[in-house]
Amino acid sequence: MSPHTSVLTLDEVSIEFGGITALDGVTFDVRAGQICGLIGPNGAGKTTLFNCITRIYQPSGGRITWKGDDLLKVRPHALASAGIARTFQNLALFGGMTVFENTMAGGSSVKGGKRQMRDRAWALIERLELVDVADHHAAGLPFGTLKRVELARALMSEPQLLLLDEPAGGLTHSEVKELGDLIVSLRDEFGFAALLVEHHMGLVLGISDHVVALDFGHKIFEGTPAEVKDNPAVVAAYLGRAA
Amino acid sequence: MTTIDTPEKTVAPRPSRTPKPRRRIVVEGSAKHRGIQALSALLVVLFLLWAASQPLFRVGQFTNVFIIAIAIVGLNLVTGYTGLLSIGHSAFFGLGAYTTGILITKYEFAPMSTIPVAVVLSFVVGLAVGLPSLRIKGLYLALVTLAVGVSFPEIVRRAEDLTGGATGLVIRSRFLAPPEWTGLVRAERGIWMFWLSAVTLMLVMLLARFLVRSRFGLAMMASRDHEIAAAANGVNVARTKILAFGISGAITGLAGSLFAQYIGALSPDGSFTLLKSIELVTGLVLGGIATQIGPVVGAFAVVFLPYYTASFTSGPLSGVVFGALLIAIVFVMPEGIVGRLTLLSRKVVTFLPADHPSRRKGERPPEEPT
Amino acid sequence: MELFLERLISGLTNGSIYALLALALVVVFRGTGTLNFAQGELALFTTFVAWWLTTQSIPVWIAIVAALVLGFVMGALIERTLIRPVQRRNDMAVLIVALGLFTGLNSLAGLLWGSETKIMPSPFPNGLDDYVSIGGARLYFDALGVWGALIVLMFLMTLLFKKTKIGLHMRAVADNPESATLAGVRTSRVLAIGWGLSGAIGALAGVLVTPLAPQQLGLTTMFSIFIAASAAALFGGLDSLVGAIVGGLVIGVLEAMLTGYISIIGGSLQQTSALIIIVAILFVRPNGLFGTQKLVRV
């Protein structure tokens, strides 16, 4: 796949909840190898859109295609084998399993022999500097460490698209910078595309190649990080509301 | 490690501790490791030989322990590893037992050949019981398993023609004679059941170990710990839960089949009531949820405790002790005896997998995390 | 016709007992979010104490009041010392503690007072002639007494929840514990009172049901009642008081009618039938018939 072809396409995606239109005709795409940031004030519909992509919600209108195929036909547990992995806002690790086991579990959709899987798991654990805690149970490890475990687990299935759900939540300023650098270097190494839903402006503007802004379920901006800051619609959306 | 004790996530990094003395490292698969395993196996064999030489009544007690241990290994799969509490496993135990009993007395099966039938039947019923777990969770599911467990004796009592109803089913001992190839006579049936149960227990434990360390094991534990994340990582949670119930029921049914051959007389209110389910759960929790040896330790406790407490009073003291134990364990040792021993042993020795990165590079093995 | 009426009366009486115990279950669930699996055995234990007091020549009514008080105290104590510390962990921990209580209380009763069936005196006149004739059927006074107890309790509960401050606090805690605490409600006290109340209601159910022939007081008395009460509570989704009462009465009447008219069910499949009802309800509505859907935050 040549770089910059579109891998995830959203076309006029809309969804309603009991009369309230949460998303209205949202259209944008994510390109191969690209980090796309999705921003917007609270209630803009970012999480709703995220949930449509992760197949928790079914849009009432529009299409979502993944590598040319209709994503809306795919059930949540088939996402991993389709090449889409995700992290969770509140960290959804397997508390009763060790870091190593958590990572291995990320390969549940992968057809591979034991040896192959273990090698890959160890490689990811080394890459994410988790060797020292590999046989530690996930429950009880520091928050920052757990973020990296989630990444290791997500990367186990060799995803072509990584969905990141507010990864900066709960981190200190310097930890966010580290996380940003880590995501970019992982992308450079593994070549996946990423969709990043995030409140932390520093992170989004710092690592995104492309930014999409939502407000009240509409797309109000699409462009580069440099263009976002000065865009009047975006500024108004954030300042005009108690974020 | 356990499902009774999942403390909240820490938000801030933990304070660093003073470095502890280095622990001994044992690499899995190394000569040292094999040596430890061989030694353990030898101890087990010696124990079995000693136990088999005890008076017949003791031999019977040990046999009972092995059978209960098999039942708890089954329960552990669905409750310990998949996180679905079942307080109705007595139904599988009873199903296995009555299948064997009926096949021997009414259809003249040889005892050993009833075992596969009991296992398959229990597997199928287990799959069926697993179905509600797709929609029903937590305490509601426990209620459903309670329903299953409590209905079993009622159904047995009702189906009198088949099961002998409330009066029970007796399997005459001549039908339970040891198979010819063993060279044992009918009177030595106790020794036969002892070894049959011991060997079956070891095979079942190997099977459980294999399952837990396989992909399916990861799927079970992932479904237990976080269903949504499990699905996001490609685990088919529904299929995992149903299969877990099926396999779990099959193993406990196997225990039931052995039980029928061991005890020779079945009655619906004897060993197949809610009390048996509670006994199994107590053994599991006491021994150690989601551990591999826990079921055996729990079985010993659960069989020998009532025996010893009975000598103190005439009342149901063992029930009080079990109740108190269950509560105490949750507070004091939610990981169970084996869980606690494992935690303690980790302070002294680390088992390193052969493919651990530090070994490849020839580095020092990891220190305890600060 | 009289047979029908007698079955109906019997059904309503048993149903009232189920409704009472179901109420106790719902009160606990609303406050703590758990089903008190040991509710039946707690009721059993307090009923044993009441029985024992009557054997010490204490009048029935006083023994009953003592049982209610004991039920309240034990309920509150259990919540404080055994349930609250473990709640923060997960569901299974609470269930196992409840299982431990279930076994422990039942065996303790057997240990202290033996396992033979005991005769429990009734607070109402219950001789063979103590009945009223309705349409040819006999409505015994003790049945009437049970109905009366349920009605009085319903009245008191409504009063409690709608008109008193503590009732308001309990509703607040049931709805949203964090907000309630922020609003100044003594959440811990409310939780303990909730369990205490439910312990007392359970005790009431126990002392009312045991004198009714053929119940009497044995170690297995309360278990089948607990099962039926759980089914009844589920009718209302475990958080509806009205649902619990309706559920209890419906199950009681259904049971009486089915046992009477369809011999295939008969007495011995009573529990299985009640439990089939439970499974059926949960299958259709995993959070109970009128229960609120739970939202899962990811």
Image (tube, coloured by chain):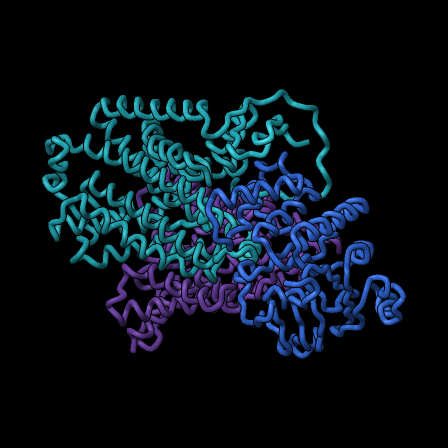
Chain colours: A blue, B cyan, C purple
Look at the picture and state if C203 lies above or below B296: below
Residue at position x 31%, y 57% in the image: B124
Residue that extends furthest to the front in the rendered view of this protein: A2
Residue B268 percent across, percent down from the top left: 25, 49
Asked if residue C170 shows in the view, the reply is no
Residue B137 percent across, percent down from the top left: 49, 57
Specify the quadrant of the image occupied by residue C29: bottom right
Residue at position x 46%, y 60% in the image: B134
Look at the picture and state if A45 lies above or below B214: below
Specify the quadrant of the image occupied by residue C292: bottom right
Residue C146 percent across, percent down from the top left: 43, 62
Specify the quadrant of the image occupied by residue B8: top right
Residue at position x 17%, y 48% in the image: B169
Horizontal side of residue A96 vs A44, given as left or right: left
Q: Nearer the viewer, residue B173 or A34?
A: A34
- From the image, which quarter does the C terminus of chain B lie in? top right
